[in-house]
Each structure stands twice: as C-alpha cells, then as structure tokens.
Image: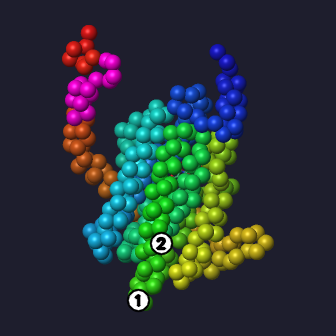
Amino acid sequence: MAPTVDLEARFLAYVAAENKVEPKHWMPDAYRKTLVRQISQHAHSEVVGMLPEANWITRAPSLRAKLILLAKVQDEGGHGLYLYSAAETLGTSRDQMIDDLLAGKAKYSSIFNYPTLTWADMGAVGWLVDGAAIQNQVMLCRTSYGPYSRAMVRICKEESFHQRQGYEIMMHLARGTQEQKAMAQDALNRWWWPSLMMFGPSDDQSPNSAQSMAWRIKRKSNDDLRQEFIDKTVPQAEFIGLSIPDPDLKWNEERGHYDFGAIDWSEFFAVVAGNGPCNTERLEARRKAHAEGAWVREAASAYAAKQSARRPAAGLPAKPHAA
Ligand code: 3HC
C-alpha cells in the first residue's frame, strides 16, 4: 500500500489541477472532516434560516408578496435537503447531523439569530443576507468536492431570485411614504453589520481558511468576499436612496474598493457562542418542529420500505420471492 504521505501529495496535486473529488475517491481524513463540518453547518443555516422569514408569511402585505415569500422559504428547505444529502455522501448520517444541531453542538450562520421586526426586514434579509450568501456561494460552485459543488450551482440560481425579491421590497418601501422609507432605512441599519459578519472572522482570525484554500474547498478568503459584497451593495443602496449605517464608509480610489468601519467582532463571537438575541428561540423552534414531525418521518419511512419491497431494483427479485 502507498504511504499516506504520497497519497496526500497526489491528492493535493489532483485538487490543484481543478479536478473534482467524488465520494468513492481516497481523501485525507481531515478533508472529509472539514467538509462534513462546513456542509452540515451550511445545511443547518438553510433550515434555521427558514424561521425568521416564516415569521412573516401570515402577515405579508399582499397575496403576491405572500406567494413569493412562501416560495422562498420553501426553497431554503430544499437547499437544506441538497446539502444534507451532499454531506451524507461523506459517510455521516442526516440523523447524526440533525441531532448535533438540536443538541446545540453544531453551528449555523450567526445571521439567523437576529429578529425580523417589520415587513421591511423581509426586504433587508433578501437583499443583504441572501446577497451575502450568494457572494460566498458562487465561489463554492467551484469547490473541490463534486457533490457540494453541484448542489451549489442550483442553490445559487435560487438565491439570486431571493436577493432580487428582497431588493424589490426595499425599492418599493424606499420609494413609498416617509414612514415606509424610514422602515426600510431602519431594517438596513439593523441588518448591515450582521450581514458583514456572515463572511466569518477576518482572515488573520480564521483558523480553517488556509487549509480549506489549499484543498480548494474555499476559493476566496473571508475578507475578500466581504469586500466584494460591500463594493457591490453600496451602489445598490445609493440607487434606492438609503444610507449605509457606517460613517467611515468611503470609496478609496487607490485601492479601487470601499474602505469601511470596524466590525464589532465581540458581537459576532457572542452570537456564535449562543448569546445572540434569538439563539434560544431558534433552537427551541427547531426542536419543536422535529418532535412534531416525527410521525411524518415514520410514515414516510414505512411507505418507502413498502415501495422498495414492491418495486425491486432492476434485475433483482422482489424481497418476498428472493432466493
Ligand atoms: N456564523 C456562525 N459561525 C461562523 C460564521 C458565521 N457567520 N463564520 C464563521 N463561523 C465559524 C466557523 O464555522 C468556524 O467554526 P468551527 O471551526 O467551530 O466549525 C469558526 O467560526 C472560524 O471561522 P473560519 O473562517 O475559520 O471557518 P470556515 O473556514 O469554515 O469559514 C464560512 C466560514 C465562510 C462560513 C465557510 O464555512 C463557508 O463558506 N460555509 C458555507 C456557506 C455557509 O455556510 N453559509 C451560510 C450562510 S446562510 C445561507 O446559506 C442561507 C441562505 O438562504 C441565506
């Protein structure tokens, strides 16, 4: 058997040449572990992310708005399913990942621990939160693990619709009455900084980045993605007449980027540690939904077992007649 050192060197060369790693390929244990960590955190973020928006489905201001929001929340559930499936190809089970989430052991994105207080928050979440998510996820379409990268292609298409629906809400409010414009500005004020935190700690404080970049799991650094997001979003805010709540924000001609103020990392770390405004509420809602959905999972499993006994895999006899 080839020594692990050779296998690791060959693996690095393989991913450096932009090849995709597939579930049955040899991979370093740490690569597998990192992927399970990142993909499961990502899946949990999609599913927990349904909660702050679902809060507004019954209160959407029109039938059109309600339909769009319903579709968006449903999409997020679908994203969670693609991602749990991608993580399962690495040898972990969905039950295990969900148990870790419900036990409070697994992380999910900090952003979903903030409350959605007004209808304008549906605009700000779509525009900023989904906008930040796409900024990060477009690079993940080129991630080295095949099942993850393929899931991301579809997810990004749907996220871009989500970003547009959010911006459309903000545009309508910003061009509405004074109260509506104030509501949009208030939502932007509350969601701006937490959206910047979504990209993760600054590069010098990011323990996983260097290795994940070497393995081509991550393709751009946390700080580079954050900067790209700011550069793209500031003109969008200007276009609809809203102000970014950062007195230090200024175009830097020399760098060709916006300079921006200091991020309050103590807030970020407190939220990630479980002490954000809604951490407890979010986990309780997930635990309740999981417990109340137990009968659905049982019924679906019983139905699937019945179907597979009736319709055997091609070329194999059905179970009752098996030799
Ligand atoms: N919220 C919570 N935890 C975060 C975080 C955030 N915004 N940003 C970083 N962290 C955690 C990391 O998970 C890591 O914790 P761990 O080592 O205990 O697992 C720690 O902080 C250090 O951060 P690193 O930068 O070293 O971690 P990564 O290299 O994993 O980078 C990441 C963090 C950029 C978020 C990366 O994991 C990633 O790209 N993940 C996939 C995308 C994702 O999960 N997006 C969630 C956004 S929301 C969403 O998609 C829903 C959509 O519908 C809006």
Image coords of residue 197 (percent x, y): 56, 63
**Screen quadrant of the C terminus:** top left
* Residue located farthest toward the front when viewing the structure as drawn: 315
Residue, x 20% and y 17% (percent of image)? 320
**Dot 1: element:** loop
Left or right: 212 as drawn, with respect to 181? right
Image coords of residue 138 (percent x, y): 57, 54
* Residue located farthest toward the top when viewing the structure as drawn: 323
Which image quarter: residue 69?
bottom left
Residue, x 38% and y 55% (percent of image)? 75
Disc on the earlier residue, 2 or 1: 2
Q: Which residues are magenta?
A: 303-316
* Residue identifier under label 2: 167
Residue type, mark 2 in image = Tyr
| Mark sitting on residue 177 | 1
**Screen quadrant of the N terminus:** top right
Left or right: 147 as drawn, with respect to 225? left
Residue 300 in magenta stretch: no
